[in-house]
Image (tube, grey):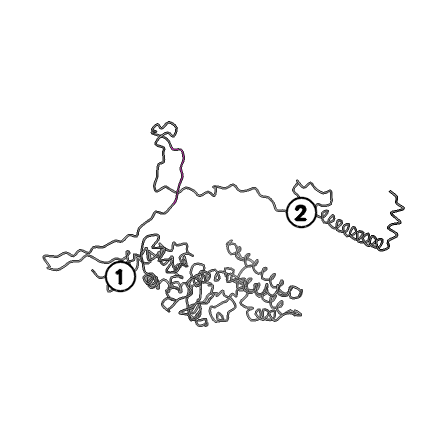
Amino acid sequence: MDMSNTSSSVSGDPSELETLRSENAMLRDEVAFLRKEIGRLQAKLDRITGGGNVPDPSIARTNPLKKQKERKERKKRTQNFVRKKDPATREVSLFAQKCPDCGRRLEGGWEHGRRQVIDIPAIPVEVTDYIITARHCGACDKRVLPDRNFQGIVVGKHRIGIRLMSIITHLREAAHMPVRTIQETLKSLFGLSISVGEIVVLAQDFARIGKPVYDALREEIRGSDYCHSDETSWREDGVGGELWSVSTPNVSFFHRDTREARVIEEILGDYQGTVVSDFYAGYNHVGRRHQRCWRHYLADLHSLKEACPDNPALVKWVDDIVALYRDAKKYQQVCRQAIASGRPLFGYMVFDRRRTREVFENELLEIARQPVPDAPDRHTTLAQRIENFLSELFTFTLYPDVPSDNNAAEREIRPAVINRKVCGGTRSKKGSLTKMINMSLLRTWRKRSIPTIEQGIRMLAEYKTPASIRAPTI
């Protein structure tokens, strides 16, 4: 190839020569960038692998910067997770009558295997006619009738028995089923035709019988060491109102009224325990002590931090409060362990816990008063909240059994919110009272691990129908 000709041809075109020079410069820059990137990746690889050669991809690599967990030997299971077979209530034998090849009749045999099927048979509703027979006494010359007390079978003049009455209440309050859905379910499962009005009346009578138990639950809350409280909206005949939830680990109590502070004051009365709640001012004058919910406050802090990520002073302010709360939770856990151990509580006596509580309060107040430049108004609001509720934020350190949050009340009121979304509220004061009583009873029984349907049957069976409202003889 004649290089002189090529060189002369290239050099003879200045524009083409300039293009080649620019392309050469661009390629040199790209090569320099790629070398720099290779160096960065090589440094990262050396940091991960500890410096040596590139390991074999087939060999599992470990990150030296990541703390390695001790691999414990897997505990052997006492049983597998396959559903165990239930005791059979009926057995059906399957066998061949004839040989499929030669047609010979077969006899005898042995068990080759089993296949278990679980199902509910179609059960028609049972309707019982109690025939009341009158007899004549010749000596007294009068008519003698048998005892017509149906206690333990039916309530009042209803035709619906106590078992079905308890099932209907369970479907309505525990399963959150609308009245018409209950009507359709009973029709399809048992062939029972029952009107919407009768379902409503059955629920009202269940609540009327359970009213003394409902009142006893309120008294039990008033005698507890601490209780949780929360509220949510509840409409009655289209008018807005408030559903109050007051609960302990073993009791649930619901009440519908306005959002005024007098409502919770009437529910708790002269309560001498600790009220765990949010920062609503309606709780200010109930209970002997208060514990304000830290989860609500931490959620507000998290929102503030996310809204101002470029303000390092504000981020540090939020992180300092969160770190202090975590230290207080660790102290509460240690106190619980010390009390549960039964050993002398050196360092964790009530006076020690009171001093520690004051330390936490002073540190939190000091953080709240720290100036934060360019902070939004929400920061001022949250700092002022510490000033206003400082004495009610660390009650859980003085009384370790008291929770630091109001999550229990949130979980307690969630079924009521679901129920509200299903039914949309109630239509009358009587309907609201029925709803509150039945929800309180069934929720309390569930907390205590008591079967709600069976407990409802027991409550109805113990009720004595007054003689004046017993069903007349037909």
Residue 79 appears left or right of 55: left
Q: Which residue is mark 1?
A: 157
Q: Residues within 10 Å of mark 1 (few under 14, many from 20)?
A: few
Does the rendering let one see residue 116? yes
Task: Report the front residue among 196 and 406.
Answer: 196
Q: In the image, what residue type sits under mark 2? A: Asn
In the rendered image, which quarter is residue 317 located in?
bottom right
> Where in the figure is residue 468, as x and y percent of width and height?
24, 65
Which image quarter is the C terminus in?
bottom left
Q: Secondary structure at mark 2?
A: loop
Question: Magenta stretch?
Answer: 111-118
> Is 112 a magenta residue?
yes
Nearer the camera: disc 2 or disc 1: 1
Q: Nearer the viewer, residue 470 or 28?
A: 28
Q: List the residue tagged with mark 2.
A: 63
* Front in this rendered view, residue 243 or 202: 202
